[in-house]
Amino acid sequence: MKIGISSLMIQRGKTGIGQYLFALLKAMLTKAEEEQFVVFALEEDLQLFDFARERVELMRVAEQWRAPLKNIVWHQTQLPRLARELRLDVLHVPSYRRLLWPRPCPMVATIHDLAPFTVTRKYDLLRTAYARYFVPYLARRQDHVIAISETTARDLRHFFRVEPARLSVVYNGVDHEQFHPTDAAAQKIEVAKTFELTAPYFLYVARIEHPGKNHLRLIHAFNAFKAETGLDWQLVLAGSDWKGAEVVHEAAHKSRWSADIRFLGFVPDKQLPALYGAAEGFVFPSLFEGFGMPAIEAMACGCPVICGSAGALGEVVGEAALLLKDVTDEAEMTRRLVEVATGPELRLELRRK
């Protein structure tokens, strides 16, 4: 079987979709040795697939197609032609905004979430309109759709009217060879050396996005936590700047405790386990998630998690995290931060769970 995979939406590998695609390809290469794989990748992203060069055929796509609108055009015009020329048996597109209208071969899509239907102002007007009014038709033209949680599957049935027979739930997995509990003392030494983090800290791994990732309320809650406890704990925000990042940076800059709010930028996968393992707590107050990989990775590393329940988060973390009933309630968020920081027994129990 000849399997085509589009990677033109991974944004240089610094997104959840990028990490999903890398992990999926690595797994398929070990489980399906008899299959042929063709990966379509933008020129500057080709190096990200060095791990698979010996097993896959990399199709170079000119950088002129990177911009979002041009990217969509490429998927609707160039990819169908290439799929026919290469005689693909199946084509996988892991992003709903890049789904094809033409049907050059059987098509499988992975859809991670339908956030534009739930979170206001998550995307600009054009992207929101495209997702709401055109993508449902594209989704129904796919031969099969993979949802990464029951929550996303339910949204696909409701908003996109995807038939249950063409819809499967395949949960995201964790690479336990990478994300697992290790020597916390050694990890603290590593993050002190790599990131100059020496004080206890709460960690949040997500792109710096406003309002979707809810950083602003977290910063306000952290300010209240510092005022109430006087502890030397820090708030560490790891992730690339995205839409609305300037609002988050301004709030941190204006904070009385701005020196204790650290922005690390994008953190490579290989450095994440130490960052999780050395943290005293992981906070994930996102307004909506189709899954919530960082919370699962943190728990896999033995890090106590404070988590919202919006979207699929409650479904995914189960009873192993300290849940926020309302992620818009800054007072509740502050209480949870105080509970974790002042409760060593609670931290131990969350690690055990």
Image (tube, rainbow, N blue to C red):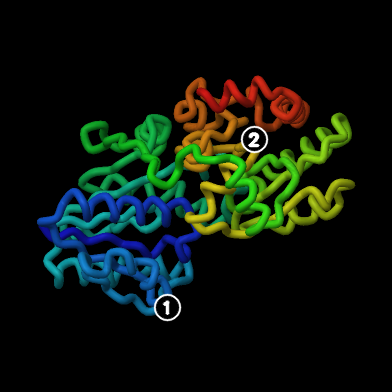
Q: Which mark is residue 281?
A: 2
Name the spot of residue 235 as percent of width and height, x first.
73, 44
- Asked if residue 312 shows in the view, the reply is yes
Name the spot of residue 20 as percent of width and height, x first.
38, 50
In the rendered view of the protein, which quadrant contains the N terminus?
A: bottom left
Task: Tell me the distance, in whole angstroms, between the alpha carbons under discs 1 and 2.
Answer: 40 Å
- Asked if residue 209 shows in the view, the reply is no
Callout 1 amino acid: Glu
Decide if residue 29 is on the left or right side of residue 114.
left
Q: Nearer the viewer, residue 67 or 29?
A: 29
Decide if residue 345 is on the left or right side of residue 63.
right
The correct choice, above or below, for 91 with respect to 163 in the image is below
Decide if residue 182 is on the left or right side of residue 230.
left
Looking at the rendered structure, the secondary structure element under dot 2 is strand
Q: Which residue is mark 1?
A: 63
Number of residues whose C-alpha sits closer than 10 Å to that of mark 1, classed few (under 14), some (14–19) or many (20 or more): some
Residue occupying image coordinates x 83% and y 51%: 258
